[in-house]
Image (tube, grey):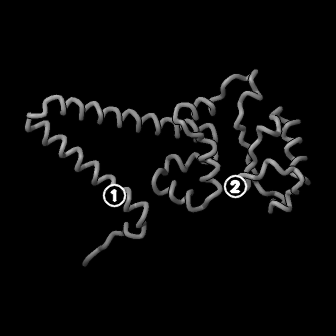
Amino acid sequence: MPLSTLRESIQAETGILPTSQHLYHNGNLLPSDDGSKTMTDLGIADNDMMAVHVRDMRVRGSQGRTAQATASSATGQDPELIRLQILGDPRLRAQAQQQQPQLAAVLEDPQRFAQMFNENYLREQRERAERQREIQRLNDDPFDEASQARIAEMIRQERVMENLQNAMEHNPEGRSIVLRD
């Protein structure tokens, strides 16, 4: 079956215009400009799972903004696109399970994933803003030794966390426990 026929079937079922459909197979975006390619040409076999992502929500204007659109506007990122990328890449999925197991546990539920993704983003923003407020408060009195000591400690902690994160990303095999008798 040509990809264009699949897009037309999706439009008939959902009302989403083919120009607004972004089809994914194994986490990879399928070409939208060439409707003459068949699903076999693209390596899509029977019973393969595909995903449809709607980028232009105006085609469904009568429904208003969805939770998905709200989540992407709050973070500046599209949680559904990130979810599809994680689902399509076994390495990303393993990394998500190691670093954020709660988020990895809801990968199969798009709404729950978007909600949790957005909550994590907002929590990180609040924590970052709180750190900035504390640094500003401490910098208000540059000659206070206690304030300067606290700023130095905060910077040290931030660097330790950054080094730990870099080590986990770039040397995952280095995280092993050594037991001695």
Give the mark nearer the N terminus: 1 vs 2: 2
Residue depth check, mark 1 versus mark 2: number of the one nearer the observer: 2
Q: Residue furthest bottom?
A: 181
What SS does tag 1 mark? helix
Amino acid type of disc 2?
Asn
Q: Which residue is mark 2?
A: 28
In this picture, residue 16 sits left or right of residue 175: right
Q: Is residue 101 left or right of residue 164?
A: right
- Residue 73 sits in quarter: top right
Say which element carries label 2. strand
Judge from the rendering whether residue 124 lies leftward or rightward of residue 163; answer left or right.
right
Which quadrant does the N terminus fall into?
A: bottom right
Q: Which residue is painted at 60% across and 40% down in the image?
A: 78
Q: Which residue is mark 1?
A: 164
For disc 1, the neighbor class at 10 Å (few under 14, some 14 to 19, many from 20) is few
- Residue at 81 percent across and 57 percent down: it is 47
Coordinates of residue 150 in the picture (x, y in percent) = 16, 40
**What residue is drawn where x is 76% and y is 21%?**
62
Real-space Cα separation, disc 1 to disc 2, in angstroms: 31 Å
Residue at 62% over, 59% down: 89
Location of the C terminus (image quadrant)? bottom left
> Residue 75 in the image: x percent, y percent?
52, 35
Query: Which amino acid, mark 1?
Result: Leu
Q: Is residue 114 above or below residue 4?
A: above
User: Within the image, what quadrant is residue 99 found in?
Assistant: bottom left
Q: Quadrant of residue 129?
A: top left
